[in-house]
Amino acid sequence: MWNLINLGYMPLKLVLGVSVYSLGFVGGITSAFKSFVRGEINELTTLIYEAREQAIAHIATDARNSGADLVVGIKTYVYQLGSGIIEFMAIGTAVKKLPGITTHSTTLIPQAVISDRDTFVNTAEGTLMTKLNQPS
């Protein structure tokens, strides 16, 4: 965020886009048969790409409605919900360029450096009593 503010951009809000897609009955049968042989399952690939485009379109609409100029720091997550249904989620920060916005110093002080962590909270962690988003 320091770099963005140094360039004159102010964070406005967190934007979220979710898209849930289904293969449908015929697509599910087709992909099940294709899973027995080696190679790409085109139906699943197309499904994920379409879900991704929709989720990012939702983010763009949310940002535009907020008056933002850009969306930065987009993270994406894909979940299989079962029965040929997938959820694609994208999260980002909407920012707007504002006159007179800048940082107090021209350089970032070392104490300000932070490490990025997942912003998504997985509720399954509480149920399973284990950290699912941490490396083993």
Image (cartoon, rainbow, N blue to C red):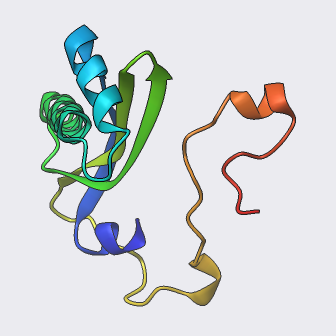
Residue 25 % position (x, y):
26, 9
Residue 77 % position (x, y):
42, 42
Q: In which quadrant of the rendered view does residue 43 lie?
A: top left
Q: Residue furthest right?
A: 129
Residue 87 lies, with reference to residue 44, above or below; the image says above
Q: Observer-nearest residue: 106 or 125?
A: 125
Residue 34 % position (x, y):
28, 36
Q: Quadrant of the N terminus?
A: bottom left
Residue 116 lies, with reference to residue 111, above or below; the image says above
Residue 130 % position (x, y):
83, 42
Residue drawn where x is 23% and y is 35% of the image: 59
**On the picture, is 66 further left or further right than 20?**
left
Q: Quadrant of the C terminus?
A: bottom right
Residue 115 lies, with reference to residue 108, above or below; the image says above
Residue drawn where x is 14% and y is 30% of the image: 61
Question: In this view of the protein, can residue 9 be seen by the observer?
Answer: yes
Q: In which quadrant of the rendered view does residue 58 lie?
A: top left
**On the picture, is 132 further left or further right than 84?**
right
